[in-house]
Image (cartoon, rainbow, N blue to C red):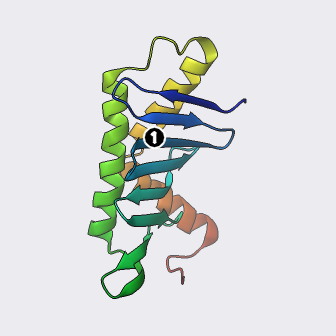
Amino acid sequence: MVPTLFRASGGASVSLAEASTSICVDETRVSSYDLGGRPYVLVRDAWTYRRAFDGRLLQKGRGRTGRVRQLLGAESGRAVVEAARREVLALLDQGLPSELQGTTRAEAVRRLERIAAMDETALRLDAQRFAALYRTSTWRW
């Protein structure tokens, strides 16, 4: 697939690359997803969140006292991931630009719908499949 970049109706930029989908809502909110619809990097304000296959989020950035690198608790992590998913739902509600046609439009819709479908339950089940496959429930960073 040839990488495609387009601006959605609400002003967000969407990039369809060979192995990922990235959405830039504004200069402080950028989200990257794998082709399964799983978020793997979320940028919110001055923070970067890296999501592991087991569902945990690593928060990185600069705090008041210097560099911060910490694992988020389940509740905090869910809120960050869900906020990004809601941005994708808003993109789908606004509709894609009319200039986007044919197979590129179909691929954009397919990817955005897959991302939107990865709600809290779907991501939890996905993390459980990962844990069962690799027979682990605890990862060390």
59 or 34, nearer to the observer: 59
**Residue at the location (27% across, 67% down)?**
75
Residue reaching furthest to the right: 1
Task: Tell me if I can see residue 55 in this picture.
Answer: no
Looking at the picture, tell me which residue is in the foreground, 122 or 79. Answer: 79
Residue 9's place in the image compared with 115, above or below, is above
The image position of residue 97, as x and y in percent, is 44, 17
Q: Position of residue 137 (x, y in %)?
A: 50, 76
Which quarter of the rendered picture does the N terminus lie within? top right
Q: Is residue 19 left or right of residue 30?
A: right
Where is residue 25? Give x, y as percent.
38, 41
Residue closer to the observer: 108 or 131: 108
Quadrant of the rendering where the C terminus is positioned: bottom right
Q: Is residue 66 visible?
A: yes
Q: What residue is at 39 percent from the left and 86 percent from the top?
A: 66
Q: Position of residue 24 (x, y in %)?
A: 44, 43
Bin the neighbour count of mark 1 within 10 Å (Cα to Cα): few under 14, some 14-19, many 20 and up.
many
- For label 1, the residue is 115
**Picture residue at 60% right of the left edge, 20% below the top:** 104
Helix, strand or loop under label 1: helix
Q: Quadrant of residue 79?
A: bottom left
Q: Answer with the quarter of the image where residue 123 lies.
A: bottom left
Asked if residue 32 is positioned above or below residue 59 in the image, the reply reads above
Q: Amino acid at mark 1?
A: Ile
